[in-house]
Amino acid sequence: MNRHALRLLATAVAAGTLVTATACSGSKAADATKLASAPVVKQAVTLGTSADSTGPDPAVPGAKSGGTVTVLQTTDFSHMDPARVYSAPNQTVDLLLTRQLTSYQYAGGVTKLVGDLATDTGVSSDGGRTWTYTLKQGLKYQDGSPITAQDVKYGIERTFEATLSGGPNYLQTWLTGQANYSSAYPGPWNGQDLPAIEVPDARTIVFHLKSAHADFPYAVAMQAYSPVPKAHDTKQAFDMDPFSSGPYRIVSHDADKSLVLARSAGWSQATDPVRHAYPDQWKFEFGGQSLDIDQRLIAANGADSTAMTFNAQVTGDVAEQVLGTPSLRARTVDQVSPFSTYFDINDRRITDVKIRQALLMAFPRQQVRQIFGGPLYGDYSNTILSPVTNGFQPYDLYHAPVTGDPAAARKLLAQSSNPHPTIVFAFANTGQWQQAAVAVASALGQAGFHVVTHGVDDKDYYDEIGNVDNTFDLYAAGWGPDWPSADTVIAPIFDGRLIAPDGADTMLFNDPAVNAQIDKINAETDLAQQDKDWAALDKKIMGEAPIIPWVDLRQVSLYGPGLGGVHLGFIGTVYPLDVYVK
Amino acid sequence: MTSLLADAPVPEATEPTALPQGRSPAKLAWRRFRRDRVGVASAAVVGLFFLVGLGAPVISWLYGKDPYTTYGQNQPGLLDDFGYPTGPMGGMSSHFWLGVEPGLGRDVFMQLVYGIRTSLLISLAVVALVTVIGTLVGIVAGYAGGAVDYAVGRVIDVILCFPATLFFVAFIPVAQAAFVKPTQEVPTWLRATTVVLVLTAFGWAATARLVRGQVLSLREREFVQSARVIGVSPTRIVFRELLPNLWTPILISASLAVPAYVTTEAALSFLGAGMVEPTPDWGRMIQRGAQVYSADFSYMLFPGLAMLIFVLAFNLLGDSVRDALDPKSNR
């Protein structure tokens, strides 16, 4: 996940910050405790069989077809062209407009990766470097024309076009073996062909990767790798009005105001194991603050009774009302999202592992979380991997109390090269982070650190901490995996060879042993073995304390009383695929 | 000539009443002020604020708390899981008279008391500088006239039509970054100095224009003309003839400027360009209050009330001072 994802996380964090006010000064402590212990759904995603992939998607109990769902969003989707889709809301709307070789099936609370356009999750050969997919029969676009393997290839070729920026770059890198993939293959608009993808017939597609990737089936589930028919490629204009391979097509799109989707003529439930298309129509309304959206969903007047939102969080202003009223509480989505937040320790500046461990030991995780809304903000984490990642093993290497342990930190500092180190704590200069800086400075000060707090302009925060020569020691960062494999977490964040301006390795961690281990795990062809090894590597890296794990974020969103089948999906938004009008 | 000289340079405002009773203008003004009940009351309130601001460390010592300790985070039970005070009215109790701050759990009363210090020190420094600079520039421009007056007048025009608030917000962080390395903290005194200097840079123009106008009208008056004719030096004319007649408008504008700068300073902190954590500050308290008001209304109430009372009292005091010094002016 690249900078876009980080931006997205920044928004997620900003949205999370709104969830500050819950228990009114007059409300009882009992209420607060009840909210605090709300259950959170966490699970890993397994590979489904070809039987799972056949379709149709198991029916949602009680669901029926028909009706119109209104989706209230603060802003329009910045991109709908699959090649440019990366942020969570964009990916979510493309769930309705695109299909992929594989996709995530959510049934009975369990998420599985299954074949979507393909009959299964893929067959690998050549030690995980060649992947073959066979397309199902009867796949059609919005106009009833057939979806072919050539279209899947063309859709992937389009992602190489330099002008179609913003999307993920996994497949492009894997197919060419180059980070600067556009120089190896510029894209299809000038008639060039990508030889690394073979299409022997209209229903077979073969990928030849430069190196082994056992998690390839997860990568092709990303919306960026959707089929696009060459005849309907309108280039840049595709972004506003993509040609749909999914269950709905665009009827009208008034940028920044509204978007209307109606059923696609070509899509059939029989071939689709991951999507339901219960509503006849989707109406999106853009604009308005999160609070306006909350208030409309609370009131649920008229058409708003069947309204929902993908990612507008319940704001602090109404949180107490929503979570304290059973009828409103019953229609909220309240789950841990895939986003993890942590504090980077700059490994180039703090080279003594004892000092890093002392920082981790003294860090006031609870005090800082409290400023951001306490339990509503998220769950404490002690690991690099989040519970939504496959192979996640809970462990607590340091047993650091969430309030920080200054005495233990002092002991660690006494054994280190400098018992009173100076720590520059950088933060985005917002009211809440300024307060957090006070808590951090106070707690670390008790442990013997000399803390310098340094506010960075909110807009520049990610650029400043992304600077490899930054002069900070401690700063907050976050990550959301692109698919539930540790390959999209540990490899990008902790591979020291990838340290670059605006890279993901913002803690500037570079351990040759870890780099070698990442290569070794990536070469493994058995996903289960990979998961086990990633979990072990997670623990090994934490032994060097490059980050202070903080919280896995939580999303609380309202939906109208006339809707059913609403839940949070892997992307970290409220999923539209199982939603029905009661 | 003699008749001109006989026209003594007595401040014209007090002239009619001064002669029969033989009281000095200051005494007369004081008499009028004492009769103004609103003025006396507001003076008492303002005095109390000054006393609290100056005596903040004493109050802290008597009260047994300081504005920096995060009591709510250190003592379990003061804040709930979500960081909000557990007690009624923002956690008001015999230990925490005005409750505790949501999130960090600092003492609200101590924050308010120390916040007065910040606000008053900054605004008084700005008013002192603005008055001195504005008066000097105004007198020079008004007395010299001609090209000097023209040049100064245009500079004042530019400054007055400049979008000052935008400039503050944009310029203050830049100015601070220029002096301090990123690995160092911006010292509190530097932050305060920057705020004072930037506010002064834009504040003197209004005073200067006011004084210039007064000087222009005084300059042509007989007592100044006669002084000039008998060869009095310009310095002496400015200080002995003009300045005594200018005290009234200067004093009034200064007394009305103090509350204006208190609110400006608070606004800057509210916008994130003024004083930052952990320096206690009213503007930042109100900003935080605006974020949490639905869950903890009292955290917005107390700083808001304190500021309202202070600004109101100071404005009323300014009005009373004007009434006392310049009874002819019409409210």
Image (tube, grey):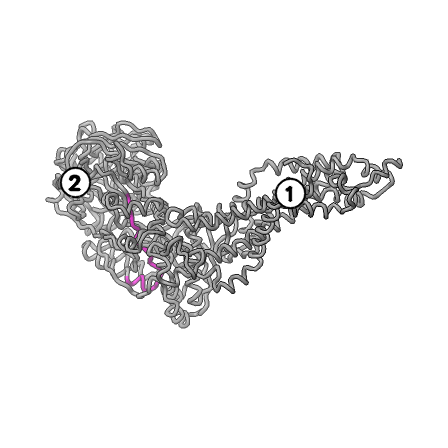
State the image coordinates of residue A342 (x, y, percent, origin top left): 35, 55
Question: Does residue B22 appear to the left or right of B178 in the view shown?
Answer: right
CB-based contact (under 8 Å), mark 1 and mark 2: no
Give the residue number, with chain letter if any, for mark 2: A118
> Does residue A554 belong to the magenta stretch?
yes
Residue A113 visible, this angle: yes
Is residue B214 found inside the magenta-colored segment of the image?
Answer: no
> Which residue is the site of mark 1?
B253
Mark 1 vs mark 2, CA separation in Å: 80 Å
Give the structural element (helix, strand or loop) at label 1. helix
Q: Is residue B108 above or below residue A559?
A: below
Q: Please state which of residues A359 and A440 is positioned toward the viewer in this rendering.
A: A440
Three-letter residue code for mark 1: Ser
Residue A154 placement (x, y as % from top left) = 25, 35
Q: Chain of mark 2?
A: A
Residues A311 and B44: in front is B44
For the record, the magenta segment spans A539-557
Q: Between A213 and A116, which is closer to the camera in this rendering?
A: A116
The type of residue carrying mark 2 is Ala
